[in-house]
Amino acid sequence: MSSAKPSAADIPFPRIHKPTSCRTTPELFAHEYEEHGYQVAQRIADAQAQCAVCPIAPQCLKWALAHPEQTPTGIWAGTTARQRTVLRTRLIARLGPDWITIVAAVDRARRERVLAKRHQPPTVSQARLAHLDREYKRRDNRGPRRPPAAHARGPEPPTPRVRSRAAVAEEVF
């Protein structure tokens, strides 16, 4: 890995075109350490439930973990500040102090693989395997779609007549 100091800029803030719950009702996600009680616990549970269905929650969690100075309080990706501190400690223990660089590199490689799959046509062998796979699934689910092979080729060619030696000898003489 690189010896440079890990940069939080390697993990960008997640963007999405439709409004998320944290953008429309930010007061639900505000939480301070000093706050306690049933109502606070209920608000945290509601915020975590909203984060559970958010399409960018994984990217939001990565960003929140990489930017502790910007996320000292509040609910980010369904986690409280204490939970994020524990997660950062585990990441450092598992991946080392440059965990941000490692996570960013894994994300970058995943995005590149997805883009490469989108832009590269399959090889001939991959296309054949996909065709065979589709045929196999089609037969399993609905039976064969084509007529049996003997009928697909048309009438059978005539087979040569098998003649005995005696018959050949009679024709010659």
Image (cartoon, rainbow, N blue to C red):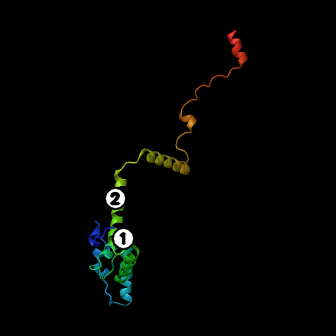
Q: Is residue 143 above or below residue 92?
A: above
Q: Identify the residue shown where x is 38% and y is 71%.
A: 53
Q: Residues within 10 Å of mark 1 (few under 14, many from 20)?
A: some
Label 1 element class: helix
Q: Position of residue 106 (x, y in %)?
A: 36, 65
Which of the labelled discs sits on residue 112, or is there none?
2
Q: Position of residue 109 (x, y in %)?
A: 35, 61
Judged left or right of residue 83, residue 166 is: right
Residue at the right extreme of this rendering? 166
Question: Looking at the figure, which quarter contains the C terminus?
Answer: top right
Q: Which residue is mark 1?
A: 58
Residue type at numbered disc 1? Pro
Which of the labelled discs sits on residue 27, or is there none?
none
Q: Is residue 145 above or below residue 1?
A: above
| Res 165 seen here | yes
29 and 104: which is toward the camera: 104
